[in-house]
Image: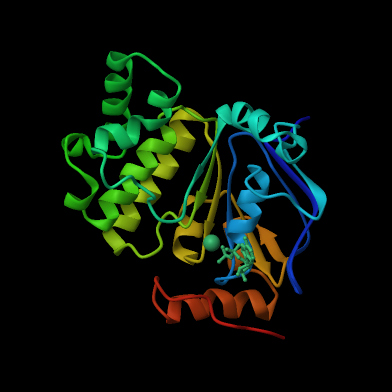
Amino acid sequence: MTHAIEVRDLTKTFGAQRVLAGVSFTVARGESVAVLGRSGTGKSVLLKTIIGLMDPDAGTALVEGRSFNVLSERERLKARTGITYAFQGAALFDSLSVADNVGFPLLQARRPADEVRRRVEEALATVDLADAIDKVPSELSGGMQKRVGLARAIITKPAIILYDEPTTGLDPLTTDVINRIILRLQRERGVTAMVVTHDMDSAFTVADRIIMLEEGRIAASGTPDEIRNHSSPWVQRFITGQSAGGSSARLPVVRD
Ligand SMILES: Nc1ncnc2c1ncn2[C@@H]1O[C@H](COP(=O)(O)OP(=O)(O)O)[C@@H](O)[C@H]1O
Ligand SMILES: [Mg+2]
């Protein structure tokens, strides 16, 4: 069977720094997998490699059985129709209205204006921001900007969404809103999700399975229950260290 995502022996080095040191896992269609790890452990590099914004030194990353990394830039753009990377930070255009930010992928694809407007309204409703359609990003809070970024990510109705730190820097209430949106997209639309985060609570809330990255390798993986009851002291310190530090705390440096 073809997995939605299959990563095999992925390695990536920047200069002397080995960021990914042989990472392998699969994500089934409709599954939601959280990737946890401290800042700088290569989570964004992993997502960017999967979607072909970066290429690995060795190993393969397959999306629906195909690798972006072997395609030309032009072919990559075409092949990315069913998959979206929701960037860390909202990455909105300050000079454009919310409507034009969210509709950007459709405007680029030269869809008719009435269709774009209808789908923008629909996407904004999904993230509970229907009222913001005619505002500009500077009029919105950070959490609302993140939701606008999310609306832009889902407007093409991708089957696979790669979320990069969707709740980082948000207050608990907004974090909860984003987590609910991620769950709703999975349950109602069958979206396959990879959610990169250093927020343990978010991972436990949105994920069917959790992968923990440390020093370029998978240090542990399993269902949220398996991770909670994991026998490894390292995993337990990772979990309790996070709760002790509050939900916005960075994961502690822990080593056996
Ligand atoms: N384009 C790049 N050039 C050089 N080093 C990079 C590049 N992208 C990421 N890195 C380095 O790789 C490491 C992992 O980065 P990243 O994947 O962004 O971490 P995170 O887990 O916080 O998302 C960091 O040390 C970062 O400095
Ligand atoms: Mg990152």
Q: The N terminus appears in which quarter of the rendering? A: top right
Q: Position of residue 132 (x, y in %)?
A: 18, 39
> Residue at coordinates 34% horizontally, 29% vertically from top-left?
103
Q: Tell me if residue 224 can be seen.
A: yes
Determine which quarter of the picture holds residue 63: top right
> In the figure, is residue 230 to the left or right of 107?
right
Residue 237 position (above or below residue 178): below
State the residue in front, 233 or 52.
Answer: 52
* Total numbered badges shown on the rendered structure: 0
Q: How is the image coloured?
A: rainbow
Above or below: residue 229 compared with residue 209: below
- Up-down: is 222 above or below 133? below
Can residue 126 be seen by looking at this rendering? no
Residue nearer the viewer, 78 or 176: 78
> Splitting the image into four quadrants, where does ligand 2 fall?
bottom right
Viewport quadrant of the C terminus = bottom right
Q: Quadrant of residue 40?
A: bottom right
x 47%, y 65%: residue: 199
Of 75 and 234, nearer the camera is 75
Q: Image check: 54 left or right of 185?
A: right
* Left or right of residue 238: residue 27: right
Image coordinates for residue 95, horizontal then vertical, percent: 25, 43
Residue 113: % across, % down: 29, 16
Residue at the bottom extreme of this rendering: 256
Q: Residue at x 71, y 37 (%)?
A: 68
In the figure, 193 relative to 114: above or below? below
